[in-house]
Image (cartoon, grey):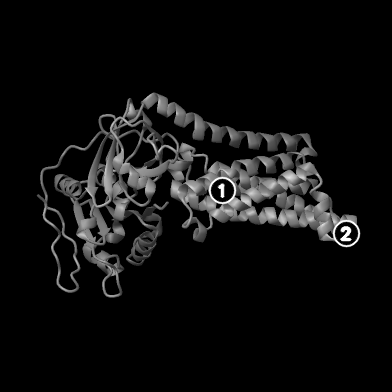
Amino acid sequence: MPQEPPRTTGGGRRRVRETSRATPRATPRATPAPPLRITFRTLRIGIVDGALGVTALWAVQAEPSARLDVLFATGAHLTGLLAGYGILVMLFLMARIPAVEHGVGADRLARCHALGGRYVLSLCAAHALLALCGYAAHADTDLLHAALDLLGYPGLAAATVGTALLAAVGVTSARTLRRRIPHETWRAVHLLTYLGAALASAHQLAGPDVAGGVLSLGLWSLLHATVAVLLVWYRLVVPVRQALRHSLRVIGVHDEGPGVVSVVVQGIGVDHLRAEPGQFFRWRFLQRRLWHTALPFSLSAPVRDDTLRITVKAAGDHTRRMRRLRPGTRVLATGPFGALTAHRRTRRKVLLLAGGVGITPMRALFETLPGGPGDITLLYRAGSAEQLVLKEELEAIARGRQAGLHYLLGRSDAAFDPLAPQALRNLIPDLADHDVYLCGPPGMSAAATTALVRAGVPEDRIHAECFTF
């Protein structure tokens, strides 16, 4: 049996040891890489170009005037068009398109979606205010009477409801409130985005900037139809097709430690999912009190013999109930998603840095990333030895492929920080020559990224995926 990591003197803090070396074991057959990956740079350029195109559409139709009501109306038209375009971008980012998910990464897409949502709500508010001021100036009335008059138009009333729905989604997604509401409640409110977007698009298609010309109306309609088709295809058709084709079922649930279980799922033709180590699926278990929620969990082992394995830490009611999953339970798994895969590698030497249950994608990469003796190193950060997950598997992999494995144990404080730049350089003297794959809780990931940069690792060689509910 593997021994516990040795203790050091002073404060009862535990530190790291490197595993012994043994005969290499065979690694599983690598799955083929997805045929297309859209990089973040390409995505950003495309979004900016689209915004410039929308601005050009507004500019060719704008009529220069010094009248106050016309100036307000012109500003309202521009902000309205940009808000409508922004809504489409937000929906596109969350359409789960494989080429985008695998190239940019789901966590980065989620951050872009959250940031973009703030801009969209700001544009919606600016559009409403400018339109109201323009109407008030044109009708020579006050803002209150102008607002009441405008709400008398069915199209404008529907657009107001749509804006209110989008605002509700934005409020519930604010960080302070998001932590206090159940995931199921947040998700249900978030679905209102589709209704809000539909009401807003109906308002725009009837507006003068879009409906005023055949070309503008055609292009705007095509843009909306394209996003709608992508959403329906990748969020509805593809998951249903995968469920029917692969017939996934739970075949085992195994305890891995306090509050941590591994769930093994088997299906038909699972290799065709083309899941890569480091990626995750969104899992829905069709069992009472679990079926209504799909949550993202990374693969904690490579795909073998038509089986998938995830390792889950109890972090709420849903994850605690997964311990009671029964063999034979049907599973709907959408994916794979995520860009924390071997395709990001640029150097021969690789450091895998995991915190807590972030070890799950790192464990799969630790086994499968190509490399000779000493090329692959795994640092596993945990508060204590009891919190280590998949420890025996990690040590067997390290021995088999002669890779480095270090446990960074103990609570961080002012006197002891195992992720400090100098501490990392002491463990890995040539750290600056490594690619770094990083996965852990948000606070740990941010601190580790700062330390790695200070230790000499270029930021573009730190490949991170931050997990949180």
Which percent across, then down, holds residue 320?
33, 47
What is the total number of numbered labels drawn onto the structure image?
Answer: 2
Q: Is residue 20 above or below residue 201?
A: below
Query: Does residue 310 appear in this view?
Result: no
Amino acid at pointer 2: Thr
Does residue 238 lie above or below 130 as drawn? Answer: above
The label shown at residue 467 is: none
Name which residue lies at 37% across and 55% down: 461
- Determine whether label 1 and label 2 are within 8 Å by CB: no
Please indicate whether residue 415 sits to the left or right of residue 238 in the image: left
**Quarter occupied by residue 383:** bottom left
Q: Residue furthest right?
A: 140
The numbered dot on residue 141 is: 2
Q: Residue at x 17, y 74 (%)?
A: 10
Rate crowding at label 2 as few (under 14), some (14 to 19) or many (20 or more) other CA atoms within 10 Å: few
Q: As drawn, is 222 to the left or to the right of 296?
A: right
Camera-nearest residue between 373 and 224: 224
- Measure the alpha-carbon separation of dots 1 and 2: 43 Å
Q: Quadrant of residue 153?
A: top right
Give x and y (percent) for residue 165: 63, 48
Of marks 1 and 2, the one in the foreground = 2
**Is 34 positioned to the left or the right of 236 in the image?**
left
Q: Residues within 10 Å of mark 1 (few under 14, many from 20)?
A: few
Residue 461 seen in the figure: yes
Query: Dot 1 lies on which element?
Result: helix
- Name the residue beneath numbered marker 1: 45
The amino acid type, in three-letter code, at marker 1 is Ile
For marks 1 and 2 on the same chain, the one whose residue lies earlier in the sequence: 1
On the image, the x and y values in percent for residue 417 come to: 28, 69
